[in-house]
Image: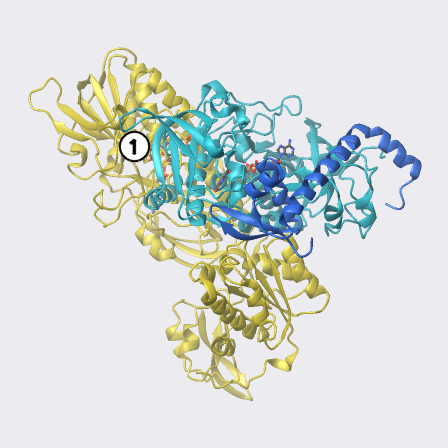
Chain colours: A cyan, B yellow, C blue
Amino acid sequence: MMKETHSFQYDALVIGGGIAGLQSALDLADQGFKVAVVEKDATIGGTMIRLSKVFPTLDCASCITTPKMAAASHNDNIDLFTYCQVNSLTRSDGTLKASITQKPRYVDPDKCIGCRQCEYQCPVYVKDEEQGGFSLRKAVYIPFSNAIPQLALIDVQHCSLCGMCAKVCPTEAIDYFQQPEQFVIEAKTAILATGFKLTPIDQKKEYGAGQVANVISSLQMERLLAPHGPYQRVIRPSDGKEPDSIAYVQCAGSRDLSLGVPYCSRVCCMYAIKQAMLLSGALPLADITIYYMDIRAFGKGYEQFFQNAKAMGIEFVKAKVGKIEQGENQNVLLRIEEQEGDGRVVRREHDLVVLSLGMVPDWNPAGICPVTTDTDAFIKCVQPKLAPTLTEMEGVFVAGVAAGPKDIVDTIAEAGAAAMEASNYLNTLSSGQAA
Amino acid sequence: MSSNQDKKPTGGQEKVGIYICHCGGNISDHVDVKKLAENVKDLEGVEVVHTNTFMCSDPGQELIQKDIKDGKINRVVVASCAPALHELTFRGAIKRAGMNPYLYEHANIREQVSWVHHGDQATEKATGLVAAAVAKARRLKPLEPIRVEARRHATVVGAGVAGLRAAYDLARRGLEVALVEKSPFLGGRTARLGRLVPSGEQAGEVISRIAGLVMTSDKISIYPCTEVTAFEGFVGNFKLTLRRKPPEEAECRAQLKKAREAGVGKGEFLPGAGVLTPNLPDREEEISLETGAVVMATGFKPYTPREGEYGYLQTDRVITLPEFVELLAKYPDRRGGFLQVKGKQIRSVAFIHCVGSRQIPGIHEPGQDGNLNEYCSRTCCAATLQAAVQVRKAFPRTRVFDFYRDIRTYGRGQEEFYEEASRQRVTFFRFEPEEPPVVQVSAGGKYPLQVSVKDTLTFGEQLDVPVDLVVLATGMMPTPIKEMVELMKLPVGADGFLQEVHPKLRPVEVANTGILLAGTCQAPMDVGEACNAAQAASAKATSLLARGYVELDPFVAKVDPEKCSGTGLCKEACPIEGAISLKERQLDGKTVVQAEITPALCTGCGICVAVCPSRALDINGWTLEQYEAMVDAIVAA
Amino acid sequence: MGKPDKEAMKALRQQRKAYIDRAKQEIKKQRKLIKAIKGQIREEAKTVPRIAAATKLPSDQVLLFIAAMRKYGQVIEVDKDGDYFTYKLSAEA
Ligand SMILES: Cc1cc2nc3c(=O)[nH]c(=O)nc-3n(C[C@H](O)[C@H](O)[C@H](O)COP(=O)(O)OP(=O)(O)OC[C@H]3O[C@@H](n4cnc5c(N)ncnc54)[C@H](O)[C@@H]3O)c2cc1C
Ligand SMILES: Cc1cc2nc3c(=O)[nH]c(=O)nc-3n(C[C@H](O)[C@H](O)[C@H](O)COP(=O)(O)OP(=O)(O)OC[C@H]3O[C@@H](n4cnc5c(N)ncnc54)[C@H](O)[C@@H]3O)c2cc1C
Ligand code: SF4
Ligand code: SF4
């Protein structure tokens, strides 16, 4: 529609609207800088807004994330660009230029009031990834109740173009003809906060390659435990049974050279313990077992959290899970090589099994931005000790899981550090210009 | 208890909106939110009641804003989590809707209700708390934050890597910085390390680099051999007294002597000590300093094992990891033969993890202060493995044994050390805390020491390992700063480290505004993590001070000149120097003496209110009238 | 968006034909499935395995649609029967 590409000017560009990106944007905005946050999803919030409760404080994730999301969206110094793809980020004439494509929502953002009339009336059901695939949404939908912005979007791949949403929308916001928009964001400094995704659940043949019923990922379990989860309680996805026996398989996807993830994903021990605690609250009668190699509860208050979990009766078994198969009655059968006790290979059956999958980067800068990645595929830090947020590119910093697995506490500290580096960079630029 | 039951809030124009949060299920699982809404909707002055899954979310905040903009309400009551979490969130929302943000009252129905009560009782108590909040809200007056000038100056206490990092960043952002260090050296504990895990950088180079930047900055004044002896004031305007004196401590003097002998001059790095500061004091003196913010970076001290703990102090062949690392740093590149320690040839060495960390009540003995270090010290696993690998590589003939509970090589590039250690044939043994390894001096054997363990990796086999040296991977404890904790009223956690407000919402701030945390005074961290924390703290300090003024909450005492008879009892009772003064005023042509409040100093504690015989004092936002109305409402509910 | 231009809509339908055809197929299948489930729980609350047995649908599919129908207010959870919960059509549906 637009021939000429718009260009917007900011002091700082933040790529990724997860907790890392939001925190650094807020820290920069507080110092008076103008910030653009570019997010590829239809909502900001990243992984954290999709979690249930968070260790070590067991605050509900929403209670911490939503206010930060709201603070960013209301801050006069911050503009949010959601549903955007970064095509390139390069420096020329001292300015960083990001070429951006905003994907069409097929909904006019100025008109949509987030009433969800369209969603209720749409006839097509689609698997809801926001609920771990355990529930359905419609072809036109708002991602979830505390998404920001609260704007509907149409998933054209599943849309039958029946016209129902356009008919029921009270503000005539539906626009089937919307086109992608191209624009350029210019900034003096940038922070990469592109986060992570989990290793694929079907990656490991020995673990049933994603085909065994009632073997779920840790993020799926977060949804089962979340206040607005798919079932609003913990039941297993194959048939709705309330599980009596739940097991965690640790390092499923990490510390495993054969999967190309030799490193430790650093948060899975703690989130498994957290989920186990939440489960024993939700299902007081259930047996919960964690099969692990080492328990890595290293952060402030984490060891105490682990010891509490032990005291609550959660069973920790040092063992390698060799194989996962379907048992009877949709149960899950584990073949376990115990590392302690008498070291036999034993088989144990559980109603529901959670794979503590590893973290891999969500973004590869190759071909988009001249920063390189390290052997672990996360963005390379050039001064990991003194200035962990520095990348190879001048004026471009990195924060959060984009620079290697870490929990929320460490992510937030690093986001503050990246904001400090970025503001210092801006400062030297302006004093340089003045001189 | 109250005599003002009939006292109507001014004018009866107050229209209260109540906003009740489910908090996901945190509240609504125990409090019947619907019933609660029903219970409070007919209270006097209540215009609207709304409930929402997450009141703090955007749609939740918009509910409030819409009612304000539509003119439906002019007082807000939010019933949700503890105000510490989201009071500011809601004040912000109210302000954006164009209303005075102090016409807002918070009822904590999560921490005070749903997390501690269940069933009908919970709903009942919630009703009481909301009713009290409504009663108070109707009596709230608009308030303005107290704006005070802020000095564009920050003080950093401690010149370890965290303190150096913070000082440099603050200076780069244009603040004047005082860097206070109690020793004559810059670099703290990092200066005593060799190669750093996982990057392999030399600690000496890292410290020299950042210390160099600090020493050449014209905005940073370094105060070596200095400690803080007095502290007063408030954010933007703290007053510090520093005492600087020539180094006396034996360790310091020994290090200074070493520096002289080695020809290490000012601004140069002395291994095992740090960068010698340029301006050593030659006489004792006191210095006063006015500063806007204080960054605490006082770091850690290694745990000292008890006598007899794994044979410590019973033989000089049991040493700690910090000692060993310092030793190893001296000859990093030597290859071949055996490692030598204290003149002895080390054919085999045992490392024992978690010494003084991860202590469990009932299993471990508390320290002298009666406390257990229940936390994991986070850095020792990787540091141990790096030392183990270094020994194996530099001295292939020295055998290495490693006794652990869990190997916690969590960080980027750390797991590689674990793998490398296995490749280098470090032998691992795993023990349970209930059955730790036992170190014995073996009389007359081929080896002076024997480590016995029930090894859970070999299915509980009892194993005896003969060694020449045992290295204890001692954990971190906070540097003892009792005086400063008392002076500055710093919050300390159960683990002894300084305590942040909230690990995710305000991770580098303590409850006292203007005091920030950087590095291992807060919790165990490695160098990279300490630098991240230091930069996060600098970012906070900058946003506090950059504008040149700070805004303080207006919840301070105020004097009613009609009633004050100038008894001065309040001034005597007030715990804060200078918060109340007695001033002469002209009243109806007569000179009277009356109390005057310095708002920026007043902490709103209310002691003066309690002692005033003529009820001339009140705390803004927490008046006696409001309290009484709250109590009445609770009784009535 | 005002009244969509007929010609333009036609062109768009042509362009998205593959998606639209698939979506239409889906709608048909989903309607049948939902109807079958609804038929089972109109009068009586039932567990997922019971609905699955009666409709000969896979139990995970049944649970998926029960979850979705609950989300959109058509189904409510009623009681517990052994290890399973029972579901019924809501008054609105
Ligand atoms: C199952 C599970 C449970 C957990 N539980 C806890 C817990 O209890 N406590 C805790 O402290 N931590 C927990 N964590 C860890 C926590 O999720 C992370 O620490 C945190 O989410 C990291 O935040 P981030 O912003 O770095 O990354 P993310 O949350 O991944 O956010 C990155 C954002 O960037 C966006 N993005 C990516 N690429 C691009 C691009 N090219 N352009 C634009 N945008 C892009 C993404 O869409 C996303 O919104 C858990 C993790 C998992 C998997
Ligand atoms: C054996 C061992 C090996 C380690 N190996 C590694 C490694 O390989 N890689 C890595 O990244 N990390 C390693 N670490 C961790 C690293 O030492 C710390 O992360 C780092 O030293 C923390 O720096 P800091 O500034 O927080 O504290 P510190 O280094 O403790 O500095 C604190 C400073 O504050 C000063 N101070 C204290 N009290 C006062 C006071 N009242 N007034 C004024 N000044 C005061 C002290 O004199 C000191 O200079 C290791 C730690 C140990 C124990
Ligand atoms: S955090 Fe725990 S589960 Fe995750 S990879 Fe590391 S050791 Fe394995
Ligand atoms: S880091 Fe390792 S050695 Fe240190 S306390 Fe933690 S588990 Fe023990």
Left or right of residue A321: residue B315: left
In this rendering, is residue B529 above or below B485? above
In this rendering, is residue A395 above or below C44? above
Quarter of the view holding residue A7: top right
Q: Is residue A210 visible?
A: yes
Q: Quadrant of ligand 3?
A: top left
Q: Can residue B164 be seen in this view?
A: no
Disc 1 designates what residue? B405
Q: Does the residue labelled 1 lie within 8 Å of ligand 4?
A: yes
- Label 1 SS: loop
Q: Which of C22 and B425 is in front in this view?
A: C22
Quadrant (top left, top right, bottom left, bottom right) of the N terminus of chain B: bottom left
Name the subunit of mark 1: B
Report the amino acid beneath label 1.
Answer: Arg
Other residues around mark 1 within 10 Å, as few (<14) / some (14–19) / many (≥20): some
Q: Nearer the viewer, residue B586 or B426?
A: B426
Quarter of the view holding residue B446: top left
In this rendering, is residue B68 above or below C70? below
Residue A60 horizontal/vertical position (percent) = 51, 49
Left or right of residue B571: residue A98: right
Q: How many marks?
A: 1
Q: Nearer the viewer, residue A44 or B537?
A: A44
Residue B77 horizontal/vertical position (percent) = 58, 67
Quarter of the view holding residue B469: top left
Q: Which residue lies furthest to the top in this view?
A: B336
Residue B4 horizontal/vertical position (percent) = 51, 85
**Residue at 25% across, 22% down:** B401
